[in-house]
Image (cartoon, rainbow, N blue to C red):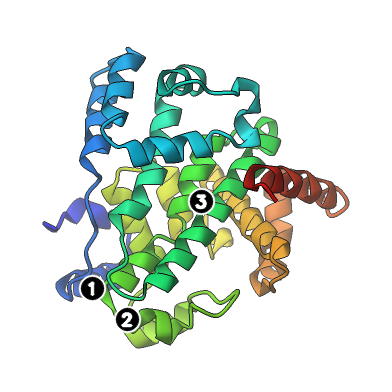
């Protein structure tokens, strides 16, 4: 890809140097797929006819199939059943549907170059967390003002720096032990072995795909909630952290990070320790129903 200095906006001098080294070493940020580019060109032009957007989406049947799957979520139960792509666009809205499509498109833009099993495991985890984030956002929307499509988009992109690094470094999965259940990239180990930070790479990817600034910031600091002073980005990180906690609970896996962020997450989402269990039950029940469990 041609190097775009605008992507580095907001990074520290050391982070800029690290990013430039990664790009020089062949780390690649793929462009948005053509269908997505066409979709956003129409949005930017102010086109309001849903038939135009439906025809654009129809060029990619696989994407359309995934879109129908995503909107089966309880987050959109008041609009179900969906009879057509035009119905989805009308019911959910053009920008909101475009956010879902942008999230769905990411996995096909970062295909496995090696270690297919690890890539498949990554995207299964990513989809589960994004669906849980969408359900949390729906439950807390009146308090947090984050909408399901935004949470789904952030949930898919939150760790997207990982598959970018997996594509470039053939030993990344093995060195980070990503095939172990519940194992995730350790930031210190990642920096030591690859001189890289998947949070920063994910931030660059989000900017490259022109995600909203608050989602870009949430991706960059999703392991460092206290660093954020932007309220909307903090709220998004809180939703994502709770979604990751729910993911671990659902699979009976340890999540040591939760203990360090729980208080801040609950405060940001307007929850208390005694109200959290009810929310967990509601969201996991909806998640299981959507998953057919």
In the picture, measured across the screen, residue 179 lies left or right of residue 170, that is: right
Q: CA distance from mark 3 to mark 2?
A: 25 Å
Task: Residue at 26%, 24% (x, y): give it.
Answer: 44
Q: Which residue is mark 3?
A: 155
Task: Residue at 32%, 66% (x, y): give it.
Answer: 112
CB-based contact (under 8 Å), mark 3 and mark 1: no
| Depth order, front residue of 97/262 | 97
Q: Classify mark 1: residues with Cα within 10 Å, few (<14), some (14-19) or many (20+).
A: some
In the picture, the disc for residue 22 is 1
In the picture, the disc for residue 132 is none
Q: CA distance from mark 3 to mark 1?
A: 24 Å
First in residue order: circle 2 vs circle 1: 1
Task: Residue at 53%, 43% (x, y): give it.
Answer: 151
CB-based contact (under 8 Å), mark 2 and mark 1: yes
Residue 251, placed above or below residue 39? below
| Comparing labels 3 and 1, the label whose residue is closer to the camera | 3
| Depth order, front residue of 235/70 | 70
In the picture, the disc for residue 195 is 2
| Comparing labels 3 and 2, the label whose residue is closer to the camera | 3
First in residue order: circle 3 vs circle 2: 3
């Amino acid at each position: 890809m041609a190097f775009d200095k605008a992507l580095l906006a907001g990074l520290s001098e050391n982070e800029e140097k690290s990013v430039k080294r990664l790009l020089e070493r062949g780390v690649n940020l793929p462009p948005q797929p053509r269908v997505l580019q066409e979709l956003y060109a129409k949005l930017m032009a102010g086109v309001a006819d849903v038939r135009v957007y439906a025809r654009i989406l129809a060029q990619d049947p696989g994407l359309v199939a995934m879109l129908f799957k995503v909107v089966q979520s309880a987050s959109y139960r008041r609009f179900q059943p969906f009879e057509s792509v035009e119905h989805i666009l009308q019911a959910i809205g053009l920008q909101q549907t475009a956010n879902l499509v942008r999230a769905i498109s990411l996995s096909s833009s970062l295909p496995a170059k090696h270690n297919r099993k690890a890539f498949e495991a990554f995207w299964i985890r990513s989809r589960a967390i994004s669906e849980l984030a969408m359900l949390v956002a729906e439950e807390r929307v009146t308090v947090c003002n984050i909408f399901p499509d935004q949470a789904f988009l952030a949930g898919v992109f939150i760790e997207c720096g990982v598959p970018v690094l997996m594509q470039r470094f053939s030993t990344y999965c093995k060195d980070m032990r990503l095939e172990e259940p519940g194992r995730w990239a350790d930031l210190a180990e990642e920096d030591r072995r690859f001189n890289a930070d998947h949070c920063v790479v994910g931030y660059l990817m989000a900017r490259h795909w022109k995600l909203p600034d608050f989602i870009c910031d949430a991706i960059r600091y999703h392991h460092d909630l206290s660093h954020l002073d932007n309220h909307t980005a903090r709220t998004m990180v809180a939703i994502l952290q709770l979604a990751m906690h729910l993911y671990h609970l659902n699979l009976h896996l340890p999540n040591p990070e939760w203990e360090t962020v729980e208080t801040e997450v609950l405060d940001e989402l307007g929850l208390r320790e005694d109200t959290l269990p009810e929310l967990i039950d509601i969201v996991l029940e909806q998640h299981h129903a959507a998953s057919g469990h």
